C-alpha cells in the first residue's frame, strides 16, 4: 500500500489527501487531529486517551471563526456558544475513535513515506521541484508547524483510507438500479375531476359555541408572548451623509478630480487567441510572420483563433472600457495605437495577439449637469470618513448613559420608538437576532441599561433600550373571535369537500358516471410523467403516482386537496418506464445509488465505533 502511495503522490491520491487535510484543518484546526500534550486538563477521555482542554478550546475558537466567516455581516452575538461547544466535543470524540480504529488496523505511514508524499505534492513544488520555502509558507498559512502538519498527514491519511475503503465497497445490484429507473420513468393515464370549495362553503356554518370550544382547546395559540416597547438610535452612513454640507469650492475640486474618469474612453479590439502549450510559441511566430508579410489580421483570426465566437467575425470584440477584460489584456490594449498589433499577451484564457481597431471618447459633462450626483458622492465620501468616528462616540456615550437622551443630543441623532418586539424579533431593525438577544438580556430587560451598539447591516448601527415590558398574556376571546371563525370555516369546508368527494368516489366505484351524477367533466391526462406541468400541481401528481395499479379494465380512485377545492383522480393505466441499456442515465443512477449506499455504510460504521467507545467526561 505504501509503495502505491509513493507512486501516486502526484496524482489523484495526493490531491485528495491535501484537500481533505486543508478542509479538515480549516474547519477543526490542528488540535482536532494531533491532540494535546500530557499533563493538561482534559474535557473527555476516549478509550483511555485524553482530549485536552487546550485542544478543545482551540477548536471551539476556530469553529466560531468559521461560522462568523459564513455570515454576510459577521456578528459574534449571533453565535450559539453552547451549541458550538457540544458539537465540537462530539466531533473530537468521533475523530479520536476513528484514529484509534485506524491504528488498530495497522494503517500507518512511516516518516519516509510522509517525506516522499510531501516532496511529490504539486502544492509544494516550484517548476516541478519540491520547494521547502513554499512548503513551510503553506503550512504556516494553515496555522501549523511543520511537525504538526506531518503528524496530521500521518493520522488523517489512515482515517481516510477507512472512509474510502468502506464507501467504495458499496454494491447495488443491476436489477435494483434498473427497477428504480423503470419506476422513475413510469408514466400514467388518469382523469381529474375538480370540486370547488365555493360549492360547499355556503352551506357551512360556524356557531359561537364552536368558536368558544376551539378557543379553549387552542388557547396557547392565542397567547401573546413576552414583548417590549423599545427606544432606539440608528446611526447610518446614508443619514450621516444627509447632514454633510458640501461647499461650492469642494464641489468644483471634486469635479476636476473626477474629470479624467468622466471623460470615458472605449476601445474596439480584435484578438487572436492561442491555447497555451508547447506549440504556442511556434504558432504565434507563424502568425506574426504572416502579418508582417501583409496578410489580414481578420483572416488569421478566423484561421488560428480558438475563440470561435469572435474568430468568425475576424477576432472582433467590439467596444469596451476599462474594467471589462483581464488586467494584462486591458493594460496592453490601452497602450496600443490605433491599428497597432500587440506582442503576445498571456492570460488565464491563453495567449493573445491584440489589435486596436478604433477609439472613441466621451466629453466630460458640464458641472451643472452633474452637480446633484457629485454632491451626493462627495457627501457619501465625507460621511464615510466620519462614520467610524461617530460610531465610536455613540458606543461610548450610550454605554455610559442612563438612557438615550444624552447620546442623541450629543450627536444630533433622533430617538425612535417601536412596539411589540418579541424574543423572535419585530420590524427592522429588530429583525436582527443579535440586537433582539441584547434587548432581552438581563442587563437591558431588568436593569434597564442600554444595549451595546450593534451593527445590523452595512454601515448601519443601532443602540436600544427597553421602554416598557409586557408579560405574556392570553388574548380575550372577543379579540380573536373572527380569526377563529375563519379558521373553523376553512376546516369545515375542507371536511365537507372530503365527504362530498368520498360519496362521489363510492358512487363512481358502483358504476355511476359523472354525467349521471351531474358532477362536472373529467379532464384527461395521457402518458403523464412525474414532472410538474401545466395545471397539474406537485401534490396532485404525487397523489396520482401513489395510487395502486388498477386491475385490467378497472379504475383506481383517489383524492387530494388542490387549489380552491379538491381533486378526484381516476387512474386508468400505468405505463412502464423504458430503459436504454448502456445509457448514461442508467450509469449515473448506478453511481448515485452506490455513493449513497457507501455513505450510509460509512456513517453506520462510524456510529458503531462511537457507541462501542468508552467515553468519560470530568
Image (tube, rainbow, N blue to C red):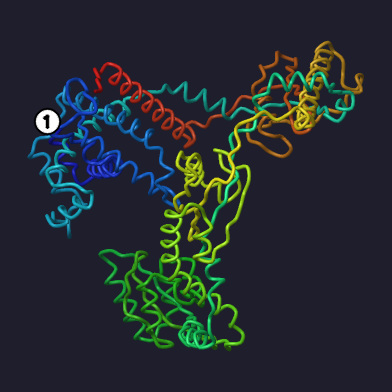
Classify the position of the C terminus by image quarter: top left
Is residue 36 shown left or right of residue 112? right
Q: Identify which residue is drawn at 42% across, 65% down.
A: 388
Total marks in image: 1
In the picture shown, does residue 234 fall above or below 587? below
- Along the line of sight, which residue is nearer the eye, 346 or 140? 140
Q: Quadrant of the N terminus?
A: top left
Tell me what residue is drawn at x 48 percent, y 35 percent.
583
Residue 504 in which image quadrant? top right
Location of residue 387 by image quarter: bottom left
Q: Tell me residue 330's x, y (percent).
A: 39, 75
- Front residue of 252/188: it is 252
Determine the residue located farthest toward the left in the rendered image: 112
Give the image quarter of residue 50: top left
Q: Mark 1 — residue?
A: 39
Question: Is 535 left or right of 292, judged from the image as shown?
Answer: right
Is residue 338 depicted above or below 23 in this figure? below
Q: Position of residue 467 (x, y in %)?
A: 58, 46
In the displayed structure, would residue 187 be above or below residue 128? above
Q: What residue sits 53% from the left and 70% below the top?
A: 241
Depth order, front residue of 289/192: 192
The answer to whether 448 appears left or right of 482 in the picture is left
* Crowd around label 1: few <14 · some 14–19 · many ≥20 (10 Å): few
* Kind of element beneath mark 1: loop
| Residue 88 coordinates in the image, percent (x, y) | 31, 33
Q: Position of residue 111 (x, y in %)?
A: 8, 38
Amino acid at each position: 500500500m505504501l509503495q502505491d502511495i509513493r507512486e501516486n503522490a502526484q496524482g489523484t491520491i495526493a490531491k485528495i489527501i491535501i484537500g481533505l487535510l486543508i478542509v479538515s484543518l480549516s474547519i477543526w484546526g490542528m488540535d482536532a487531529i494531533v491532540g494535546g500534550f500530557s499533563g493538561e486538563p482534559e474535557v473527555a477521555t476516549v478509550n483511555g486517551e485524553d482530549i485536552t482542554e487546550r485542544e478543545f478550546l482551540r477548536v471551539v475558537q476556530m469553529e466560531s471563526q468559521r461560522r462568523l466567516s459564513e455570515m454576510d455581516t459577521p456578528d459574534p452575538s449571533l453565535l450559539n456558544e453552547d451549541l458550538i461547544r457540544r458539537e465540537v466535543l462530539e466531533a473530537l470524540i468521533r475523530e479520536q475513535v476513528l484514529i484509534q480504529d485506524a491504528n488498530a488496523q495497522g494503517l500507518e505511514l512511516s516518516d519516509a513515506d510522509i517525506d516522499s508524499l510531501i516532496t511529490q505534492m504539486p502544492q509544494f513544488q516550484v517548476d516541478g521541484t519540491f520547494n521547502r520555502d513554499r512548503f513551510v509558507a503553506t503550512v504556516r498559512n494553515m496555522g501549523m508547524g511543520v511537525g504538526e502538519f506531518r503528524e496530521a498527514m500521518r493520522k488523517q491519511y489512515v482515517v481516510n483510507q477507512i472512509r474510502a475503503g468502506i464507501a467504495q465497497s458499496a454494491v447495488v445490484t443491476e436489477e435494483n438500479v434498473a427497477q428504480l429507473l423503470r419506476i422513475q420513468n413510469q408514466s400514467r393515464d388518469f382523469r381529474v375531476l375538480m370540486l370547488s370549495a365555493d360549492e360547499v362553503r355556503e352551506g357551512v356554518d360556524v356557531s359561537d359555541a364552536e368558536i368558544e370550544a376551539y378557543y379553549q382547546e387552542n388557547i396557547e395559540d392565542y397567547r401573546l408572548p413576552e414583548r417590549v416597547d423599545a427606544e432606539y438610535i440608528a446611526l447610518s452612513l446614508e443619514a450621516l451623509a444627509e447632514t454633510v454640507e458640501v461647499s461650492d469650492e469642494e464641489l468644483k475640486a471634486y469635479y476636476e478630480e473626477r474629470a479624467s474618469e468622466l471623460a470615458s474612453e472605449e476601445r474596439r479590439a480584435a484578438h487572436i487567441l492561442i491555447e497555451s502549450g508547447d506549440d504556442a510559441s511556434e504558432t504565434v511566430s507563424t502568425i506574426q510572420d504572416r502579418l508582417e508579410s501583409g496578410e489580414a489580421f481578420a483572416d488569421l483570426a478566423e484561421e488560428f483563433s480558438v475563440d470561435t465566437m469572435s474568430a468568425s467575425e475576424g477576432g472582433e470584440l467590439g467596444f469596451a472600457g476599462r474594467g471589462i477584460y483581464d488586467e494584462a489584456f486591458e493594460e496592453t490594449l490601452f497602450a496600443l495605437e490605433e491599428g497597432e498589433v500587440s506582442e503576445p499577451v498571456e492570460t488565464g484564457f491563453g495567449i493573445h495577439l491584440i489589435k486596436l481597431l478604433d477609439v472613441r471618447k466621451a466629453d466630460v459633462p458640464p458641472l451643472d449637469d452633474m452637480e446633484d450626483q457629485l454632491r451626493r458622492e462627495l457627501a457619501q465620501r465625507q460621511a464615510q470618513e466620519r462614520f467610524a468616528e461617530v460610531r465610536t462616540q455613540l458606543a461610548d456615550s450610550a454605554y455610559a448613559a442612563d438612557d438615550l437622551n444624552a447620546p442623541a443630543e450629543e450627536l444630533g441623532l433622533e430617538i425612535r420608538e417601536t412596539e411589540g418586539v418579541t424574543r423572535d424579533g419585530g420590524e427592522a431593525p429588530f429583525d436582527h437576532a443579535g440586537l433582539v438577544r441584547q434587548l432581552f438580556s438581563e442587563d437591558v430587560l431588568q436593569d434597564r441599561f442600554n444595549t451595546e451598539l450593534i451593527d445590523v447591516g452595512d454601515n448601519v448601527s443601532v443602540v436600544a433600550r427597553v421602554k416598557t415590558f409586557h408579560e405574556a398574556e392570553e388574548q380575550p376571546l372577543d379579540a380573536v373571535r373572527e380569526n377563529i371563525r375563519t379558521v373553523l370555516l376553512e376546516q369545515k369546508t375542507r371536511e365537507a369537500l372530503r365527504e362530498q368527494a368520498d360519496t362521489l368516489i363510492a358512487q363512481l366505484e358502483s358504476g355511476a358516471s359523472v354525467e349521471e351524477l351531474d358532477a362536472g367533466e373529467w379532464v384527461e391526462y395521457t402518458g403523464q410523467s412525474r414532472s410538474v406541468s401545466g395545471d397539474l400541481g406537485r401534490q396532485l401528481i404525487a397523489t396520482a403516482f401513489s395510487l395502486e395499479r388498477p386491475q385490467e379494465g378497472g379504475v383506481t380512485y383517489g383524492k387530494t386537496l388542490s387549489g380552491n377545492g379538491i381533486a378526484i383522480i381516476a387512474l386508468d393505466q400505468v405505463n412502464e418506464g423504458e430503459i436504454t441499456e448502456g445509457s448514461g442515465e442508467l450509469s449515473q443512477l448506478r453511481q448515485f445509488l452506490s455513493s449513497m449506499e457507501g455513505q450510509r455504510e460509512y456513517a453506520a460504521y462510524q456510529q458503531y465505533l462511537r457507541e462501542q467507545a468508552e467515553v468519560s467526561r470530568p
